[in-house]
Image: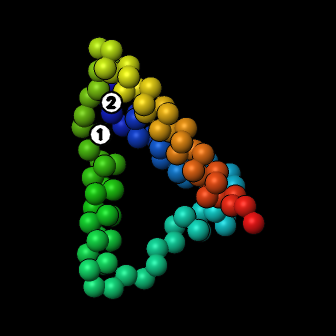
Amino acid sequence: MNAILLILPIILLRYGFMAFFGKNSMEKANFFPPTLGKEQTAYYIYQFTTLFLLIFPLFKQIHFETAVDLIGIIIYIIGAVLYMLSIIHFSKPEA
């Protein structure tokens, strides 16, 4: 199985699920404050690593053969649920 299948749920949660809460949520999530000096370098490193993490799985295959693989999938699912909960709390903050 291609490893990109592990990234697709994250992308769908990040953009699809957040869009469900409205345009304001997407604007708030996509806002980056102006950067100066070393902050700009850190921003470019962040952008480069994000791009790498989206492209690298296209060339990687994953196999589920051992119990450790099953544990990894369980941890992945727990992480995806926690990510979804953080999106909900980010998009609909309490007063």
Q: Work out whether residue 60 or residue 88 is closer to the camera in this orientation and state it.
A: 88
Q: What residue is at 33 percent from the left and 21 percent from the top? A: 69
Residue sitting at 26 percent across and 29 percent down?
61
The percent position of residue 53, horizontal first and vertical second, equals 31, 49
Q: Quadrant of residue 58?
A: top left
- Examine the rendering and report whether any part of residue 16 can be seen: no
Spatial separation of the CA atoms under disc 1 and disc 2: 7 Å
Farthest residue in the front direction?
A: 95
Question: Can you tell which quarter of the image residue 72 is in?
Answer: top left
In the displayed image of the protein, which residue is found farthest to the right? 95
Q: Residue furthest bottom?
A: 36
Point out residue 3 in the picture as x, y percentages from the top left corner: 33, 33
At label 2, which amino acid type do we have? Answer: Asn
Please give the residue where the numbered disc 2 appears in the rendered image.
Answer: 2
Q: For this view, does 13 lie left or right of residue 4?
A: right
Indicate whether 28 appears above or below 33: above
Residue type, mark 1 in image:
Leu
Q: Residues within 10 Å of mark 2 (few under 14, many from 20)?
A: few
Count of number-bearing discs: 2
Helix, strand or loop status at disc 2: loop
Callout 1 touching callout 2 (CB < 8 Å): yes
Q: Disc 1 marks which residue? A: 58
The N terminus, quarter of image = top left
Q: Quick one: label 1, few (<14), some, or many (20+) residues within 10 Å?
A: few
Give x and y (percent) for residue 43.
33, 71
Circle 1 sits in a helix, a strand or a loop, which is it? Answer: helix
Residue 69's place in the image compared with 5, above or below, is above
